[in-house]
Image (spheres, coloured by chain):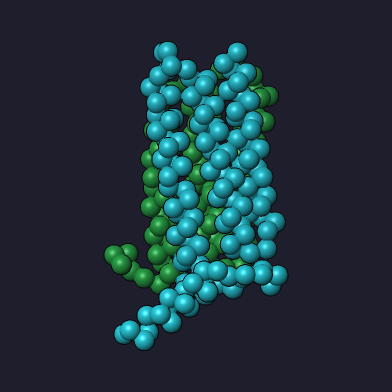
Chain colours: A cyan, B green
Amino acid sequence: MNSIIGVTFLVIGLLFNLLGCIGLIRLPDVYNRLQAATKCVTMGTCMVLLGVVVMSGFGAGIHTSLKALLCMSFILVTAPTAAHAIGQGAHAAGIKLWDKSVVDRYAEDHESEIDKKEPVA
Amino acid sequence: MAFLSNPVVFGLLALGFIACGGMCFYRIGRGPTAPDRAVAIDILGIIVVCFAALFSLKTGNGFYIDIGIAWAILSFIGSIALAKHLEGKGFDE
């Protein structure tokens, strides 16, 4: 029974990973690719590690389960942080948005901050 | 672990993760700008953790999860360093 639930979690995680990587290929822009790939791959990897937890169990394989939980919490914290840093770096490097993108809130906020700061200084 | 001893199930799962890695390698090679490659390297680092988890289940050894934790930490530090480099700053700013 545990192995059926565990393999189900593994298959769900694999599907999320595949959809994220297809988004990494098919989407037109750095920011869209970042959006699709990071969310889906984080969710998929957490599902795979949850499958490891279910299949190892909390009996004899409790060391593997606890390490998988640790790895899952670590990935949940670090992957969005790294994606945010890369997106900010791409925006600072001057990468243009896609032609059909409608709004760029980060640039608007950045300009307003600069406008507020300059008269003070 | 009864299902993963079946070579067809394990082969299909491993083939799916290999396809994910192949798509990341496509974006690393093809990507028009440097942040595209940085994103693909970040995603490839997370998919390697999936591989470590799958091999941990296949072989029954717990230390593959240790490899996954170490790989996640190193991938995170590498992604932060790449982002700082893209932003045009030094590593201590």
Regarding residue A107, the answer to whether it shows in the image is yes
Image quarter hosting the N terminus of chain B: top right
Residue A28 x, y percent position in the rendering: 68, 63
Is residue B77 placed above or below A45 in the rendered structure?
Answer: below
Vertical side of A61 occupied by B39: above or below: below
Spot occupied by residue A45 in the image (x, y as percentages of width and height): 54, 38
Does residue B90 lie above or below B45 as drawn? below
Q: Residue at x 42, y 13 (%)?
A: A59
* Residue A22 x/y as whole percent: 68, 49
Q: Nearer the viewer, residue B4 or A72?
A: A72
- The residue located at (51%, 69%) in the rendering is A106
Answer with left or right where residue A73 lies relative to residue B38: left
Q: How many marks?
A: 0
Q: Is residue A39 left or right of residue A77?
A: right
Seen as rendered, the residue at the extreme left is B92
Q: Quadrant of residue A66?
A: top left
Q: Quadrant of the C terminus of chain B?
A: bottom left
Q: Is residue A120 left or right of residue A112?
A: left
Figure quadrant of residue A29: bottom right
